[in-house]
Amino acid sequence: MAHRAGETAISKQGRNREGQAGSSRLNGILTLLILGVLVFVGVKIVPVYITNYQFHDAMLAEARFALSSYPKKSDTDVQDDLYKEATKDGIDIKHDDIKVLINGSLVTITLDYAVPIDLKAYQFTLHFHCLADNHTI
């Protein structure tokens, strides 16, 4: 009888190890699935934010240097330059969406636009409000 009790303890340990191995495989699969979803979402969303950042940087440059160029740029010139930059960057806006106000030595540029994001199972829209001016600190 004692010999049989030892066998059952060993066979129970073997079953526990098999359960642990199945559990770790499931954890590995879930981890890979979650990482895959995060990479997919990142590939869809991060480029939109990078494009917005680069365009906002172009807006800041236009606001800073619009009045220091020779001849000085008009609000239409600034608007045209930024519209070209936006279309080059793939930002879907209308020319009139870019608002430029030059008042004396102050230049203010604003743009509101939205980018639809399609994650296959979930769709949403990112809204951006860009503001650039030549104020000094």
Image: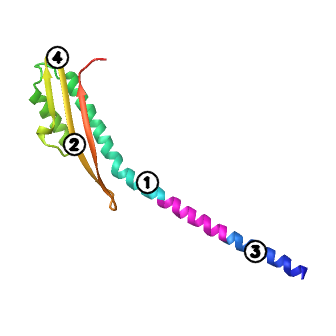
| CA distance separating discs 3 and 4 | 83 Å
Tell whether label 1 touches label 4 (CB within 8 Å). Answer: no
Q: Quadrant of the N terminus?
A: bottom right
Q: Quadrant of the C terminus?
A: top left
Q: Mark 3 or mark 2: name the one nearer the start of the chain.
A: 3
Determine crowd level at label 4: few under 14, some 14-19, many 20+ residues with C-alpha closer than 10 A.
Answer: few
Residue 21 location (% of width, % of height): 64, 68
Find disc 3 in the rendering and name its residue: 12
Find disc 2 in the rendering and name its residue: 113
**Amino acid at pointer 3:** Lys
**Which quadrant of the figure has residue 77?**
top left
**Which quadrant of the figure has residue 135?**
top left
Find disc 1 in the rendering and name its residue: 38
Determine crowd level at label 1: few under 14, some 14-19, many 20+ residues with C-alpha closer than 10 A.
Answer: few
Q: Mark 1 or mark 2: name the one nearer the start of the chain.
A: 1
| CA distance separating discs 4 and 1 | 46 Å
Give the answer, above or below, for where 55 lies relative to 104: below
**Amino acid at pointer 1:** Leu
Tell whether label 4 touches label 3 (CB within 8 Å). Answer: no
| CA distance separating discs 3 and 2 | 63 Å
**Amino acid at pointer 2:** Tyr
The stretch of residues the image draws in magenta is 19-33
**Amino acid at pointer 4:** Ser
| CA distance separating discs 1 and 2 | 25 Å
Q: Which mark is residue 105?
A: 4
